[in-house]
Amino acid sequence: MPTPIPVAALGQPGGVPPVCVRHAAPAIRRKPVLFRSTPPTWSFLLILLGVLPFAIVATIMQKRVTVPNWPFCRACARQRLRRLLGGIGVALLGFIAVIGFSAAMPPSSSLTAVVVILSFAVLLAGVVFASTSGWATLAAAKLASDGTSLRLRKAHPNFSMATD
Ligand SMILES: [Zn+2]
């Protein structure tokens, strides 16, 4: 894993990666990306009290930084499109199945319930998959929990911050 990028350097010349981090390929576009830190481990215990207390604490504890010009290459753009279209396609299929099966199968049968729940799970899986097409997920960089540096989690072996 390459050295984390100090957040303070991101606004400086040479602070933002010169090429795509994931594929070490030339950037075809630069996008504003909001990077977040993972909430502290102990905050997940709050889920026991309910999702809302966890969500509130996690939101407060989470550090965020927006990089206005993160580089993405052609492979990144393709991956984004695949995830987005694939996810939407699967979700649509699940949606049609939910509607179709609930209309076509006997409403009181327990098999109908199972089939409809499974179709709904397919719909959700599609939505989750489509949600991985966000630029921050594609960039695969994570803000350290103190918010001072960006860790490049899936950097290409050939990736380097040097601009030669
Ligand atoms: Zn890329």
Image (cartoon, rainbow, N blue to C red):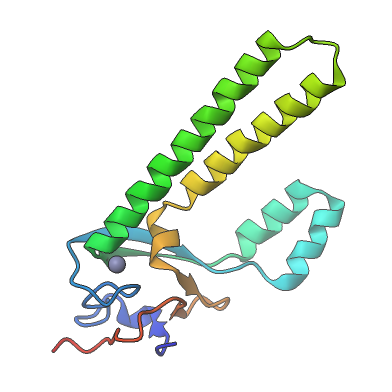
Examine the rendered structure and indicate whether residue 57 appears above or below residue 108: below
Residue drawn at (42%, 49%) of the image: 83
Where does the image place residue 58, in percent across and percent down from the top left?
Answer: 66, 60
Question: Which quadrant: the N terminus?
Answer: bottom left
Closer-to-camera residue (142/85): 85
Residue drawn at (31%, 82%) of the image: 9
Where does the image place residue 70, in percent across and percent down from the top left?
Answer: 28, 66
Q: Is residue 95 left or right of residue 114?
A: left
Where does the image place residue 161, in percent across and percent down from the top left?
Answer: 27, 86
Residue drawn at (42%, 85%) of the image: 4
Give the mark count.
0
Residue drawn at (73%, 30%) of the image: 117
Q: Determine the residue located farthest toward the left in the rendered image.
A: 164
Q: Quadrant of ligand 1?
A: bottom left
Examine the rendered structure and indicate whether residue 135 appears above or below residue 109: below
Question: Which quadrant: the C terminus?
Answer: bottom left
Q: Is residue 98 left or right of residue 159?
A: right
Closer-to-camera residue (21/81): 81
Where does the image place residue 20, in percent across and percent down from the top left?
Answer: 27, 72
Q: Is residue 112 left or right of residue 16?
A: right
